[in-house]
Image (tube, rainbow, N blue to C red):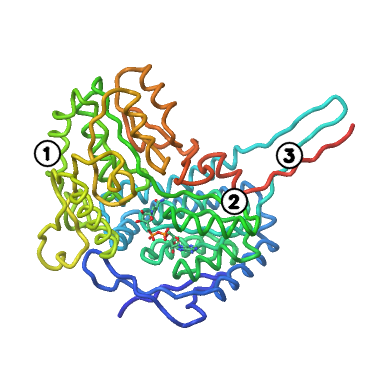
């Protein structure tokens, strides 16, 4: 029998008011993994009401220390169930189990531990005047809506939930309808560690139904959204019209910029990881590799060889580098970009086709990792977000040319720069229109640093004190002496 995942509202695990469900289909086998409630505005209203009641109950009296201890307890449980939760995440997303077990779930543990510690240390402003003092109180916003995507389900939900609880808010969360499973596990764990009912409410369902209702609900005071840029525009518009605080983490078309003075072996390895981690379905993925012309041929040959040797297949196999894409529909979108690349004059250096994996994996949404050369840097393939295992590679002349190409897209999330010239590393990092630059590495994360992008990649920053500040409201008190 197919498992029916419930919503969690006011501490009750229950179906949607409609009684309707949606199938959650495996992108690995094509089978139905579970069903989720097809929630609508009524379920969201119930969740918002529960969140409001919880904010006026015992939760309001919890000290910072108690909240931090609860986050640590959540981290301990996730860690103790790491392999089991990684297996759930891998089944739900199609990503390799090894990736979920070494990145996604450890990162969820780290998010809870980090924000437990961060909130214990957090302090606010005090400003003295000749005849007055000012001090700044920091208060919860109230109820916050968390809307998360399918590529890093628990990783991103925990990234928002931990600081949100740390600051004493209540939550209405909606995970992606195509990766709902680990969010339900988190709701169960929060229940188990004794979070008061109604503080964390989980509402499953479709974006334009349950998601939209969260953004519109008058009692939900802030929205933290991670997802696609076009959805982000709708969320941003709806939230701003209602004067809600909003944080948008959106798409990217990030450049991996390789200068001829780099350590080529390390740059190839870094560009492969940046291009194809999680089947290229990370907003930070380096989907445009820009290589200085003197080493272009050598770099391209080594890069293509490494990519063509990556193993695609069963996510449960520890030797698998790439699992399935998130859905069959998404694979079609990615394949349409490969077809477009050919029309635009690109050469498929490797990949671009479906692997032959045998039953039952032949029913899955697998695609070989793909490298495309010969495209104009302003072509659609080289400038639009594909969000799959497809990387374009382009030569450039000098620093100015590299920066011009890197900046010629509508996105501005991240970049990696590969050079051994310190001055160049600083100059190019400063000139790139992005929120985050890595030099001689990729996706090295310190949870204290600002995370987020510019241009169509989003609005606002999360991470460290940025998250604690986003999920709270400062209030200044000025006392005349
Ligand atoms: O994401 P959506 P989709 C990019 C990637 C991908 C594209 C579309 O390019 O191909 O976005 O993916 C909820 N009001 N990224 O369509 O729709 C939805 O239910 C409120 C980049 O799957 O943005 C889900 O929970 N919520 C990204 C969440 O928004 C709405 C990661 C994200 O889904 C809504 C994923 C609405 N009107 C995709 N409509 C990243 N930044 O990492 C949908 N949702």
Which quadrant is the C terminus positioned in? top right
The residue lying toward the viewer, choosing from 424 and 158, is: 424
Q: Which quadrant of the render holds ligand 1?
A: bottom left
Label 3 sits on residue: 136
Q: Is residue 435 above or below residue 333?
A: above
- Where in the figure is residue 49, as x and y percent of width and height? 64, 70
Residue at image mark 2: 67
Residue sticking out furthest to the bottom = 19
Of labels 2 and 3, the one closer to you:
3
> Does residue 452 show up?
no
Local SS, label 2: helix
Specify whether residue 56 is in view.
Answer: yes
Q: Residue 429: x and y, percent? A: 41, 27
Are the residues flagged by discs 3 and 1 in contact, CB closer than 8 Å?
no
- The answer to whether 55 appears left or right of 246 in the picture is right
Which residue is found at the position 65% from the left and 37% from the top?
123
Residue 332 shown left or right of residue 282 in the figure: left
Q: Residue at x 56, y 62 (%)?
A: 215
Residue indicated by mark 1: 305
Alpha carbons under labels 2 and 1: distance apart: 50 Å
Between residue 425 and residue 140, name the one nearer to us: 425
């Amino acid at each position: 029998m197919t498992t029916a995942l419930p919503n969690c509202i006011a501490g009750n695990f229950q179906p949607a008011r409609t009684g309707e469900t949606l199938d959650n289909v495996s992108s690995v086998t094509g089978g139905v993994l579970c069903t989720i409630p097809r929630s609508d505005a009524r379920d969201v209203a119930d969740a918002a009401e529960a969140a409001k009641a919880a904010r006026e109950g015992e939760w309001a009296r919890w000290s910072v220390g108690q909240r931090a201890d609860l986050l640590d307890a959540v981290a301990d449980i996730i860690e103790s169930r790491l392999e089991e939760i990684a297996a759930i995440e891998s089944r739900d997303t199609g990503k390799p189990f090894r990736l979920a077990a070494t990145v996604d779930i450890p990162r969820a543990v780290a998010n809870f531990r980090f924000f437990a510690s961060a909130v214990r240390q957090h302090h606010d402003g005090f400003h003295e005047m000749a005849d007055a003092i000012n001090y700044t109180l920091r208060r919860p916003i109230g109820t916050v809506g968390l809307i998360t995507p399918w590529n890093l389900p628990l990783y991103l939900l925990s990234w928002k939930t931990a600081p949100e609880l740390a600051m004493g808010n209540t939550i209405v969360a909606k995970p992606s309808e195509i990766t709902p499973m680990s969010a339900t596990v988190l709701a169960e764990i929060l229940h188990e560690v004794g979070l008061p009912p109604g503080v964390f409410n989980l509402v499953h369902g479709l974006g334009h139904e349950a998601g939209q209702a969260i953004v519109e609900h008058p009692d939900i005071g802030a929205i933290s959204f991670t997802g696609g840029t076009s959805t982000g525009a709708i969320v941003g518009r709806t939230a701003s019209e209602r004067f809600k605080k909003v944080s948008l983490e959106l798409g990217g078309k990030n450049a991996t910029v390789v200068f001829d003075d780099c350590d080529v072996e390390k740059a190839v390895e870094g560009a492969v990881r940046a291009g194809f981690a999680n089947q290229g379905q990370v907003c930070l993925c380096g989907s445009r590799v820009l290589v200085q012309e003197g080493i272009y041929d050598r770099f391209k040959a080594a890069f293509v060889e490494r990519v063509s040797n990556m193993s695609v297949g069963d996510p449960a196999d520890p030797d698998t580098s790439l699992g399935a894409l998130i859905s069959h529909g998404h694979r079609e979108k990615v394949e349409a970009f490969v077809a477009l690349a050919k029309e635009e004059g690109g050469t498929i250096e490797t990949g671009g086709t479906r692997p032959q994996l045998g039953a039952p994996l032949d029913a899955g949404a697998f695609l070989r990792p793909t490298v495309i050369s010969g495209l104009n840097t302003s072509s659609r393939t080289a400038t639009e977000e594909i969000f799959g295992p497809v990387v374009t590679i382009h030569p450039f002349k000098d620093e100015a040319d590299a920066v011009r190409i890197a900046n010629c897209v509508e996105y501005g999330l991240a970049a990696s720069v590969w050079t051994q010239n310190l001055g160049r590393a600083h100059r190019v990092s400063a000139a790139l229109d992005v929120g985050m630059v890595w030099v001689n590495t990729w996706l090295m994360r310190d949870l204290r640093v600002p995370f987020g992008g510019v241009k169509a990649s989003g609005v606002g920053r999360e991470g460290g004190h940025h998250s604690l500040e986003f999920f709270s409201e400062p209030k200044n008190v000025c006392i005349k002496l």
